[in-house]
Amino acid sequence: MTEIKYDLACGNNKQAGWTGIDLKKEGTQADIEFDLETYPWTFAEDNSVDELYCSHYVEHTADLIKFMDECYRILKPQGKLTIIAPYYSSMRAWQDPTHKRAICDATFLYFNKQWVNANNLQHYNIKSDFDFVTSYVMDIMWGSRSQEARDFAIRYYWNVVSDIQVILTKRP
């Protein structure tokens, strides 16, 4: 059985072996032309997709909750969603006038029902329920520093982390 893997907003950086989706096919590596701001997504059924990859798009989307809920809807239980975005404390997150939001680790807490319930935020009406892990693309000067120094720098300094990578797993 062939796995279904979509590279959302792939542009010209489509992952090898994945089906690329973008607003336009012309001038991109997209296999499917689709506006990801249109809901529901008609290119996939509920619980039908094994894996989603999305690099440098979520900071542009008009409605992150709708986007995340749609990813959740089409992913199979235990399906994976990888998101890469400029980190909130990097000037890259703020320099682009087409960015609508900055992304940090805590952004993804809102897409975990256990955390939402513990913080009495059910009124946000978020359907998604993901577990997640994060990692960072850091400025090269921090690569040889101790983990303690890196952790301190991530929390308190600007431009230490350029991108955040989040791997979300759909909870059953």
Image: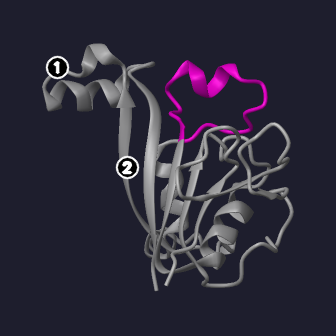
Label 2 Cα neighbours within 10 Å, binned few <14 / some 14-19 / many ≥20:
some
Q: Is residue 55 above or below residue 125?
A: above
Q: Which residues are magenta?
A: 85-103
Tell me which colouring the rendered structure shows.
one colour
How far is disc 1 from disc 2 in space, using C-alphas?
A: 20 Å
Q: Quadrant of residue 5?
A: bottom right
Residue for badge 1: 144
From the viewer's perspective, is 149 left or right of 13?
Answer: left
Q: Residue at x 71, y 45 (%)?
A: 29
Labels 1 & 2 near each other (Cβ < 8 A): no
Name the chief secondary structure element in magenta.
Answer: loop
Q: Nearer the viewer, residue 120 or 95?
A: 95
Q: Residue at x 30, y 24 (%)?
A: 153
In the image, residue 161 lies in the stretch drawn in magenta: no
Q: Quadrant of residue 122?
A: bottom right
Q: Residue at x 49, y 27 (%)?
A: 89
From the viewer's perspective, is 121 left or right of 46?
Answer: left
From the viewer's perspective, is 152 left or right of 146?
Answer: right
**Which numbered disc covers residue 120?**
none
Task: Report helix, strand or loop for mark 2.
Answer: strand
Label 1 Cα neighbours within 10 Å, binned few <14 / some 14-19 / many ≥20:
few
Q: Nearer the viewer, residue 70 or 43?
A: 43
Residue for badge 2: 134
From the viewer's perspective, is 76 left or right of 165?
Answer: right
In the image, residue 86 lies in the stretch drawn in magenta: yes
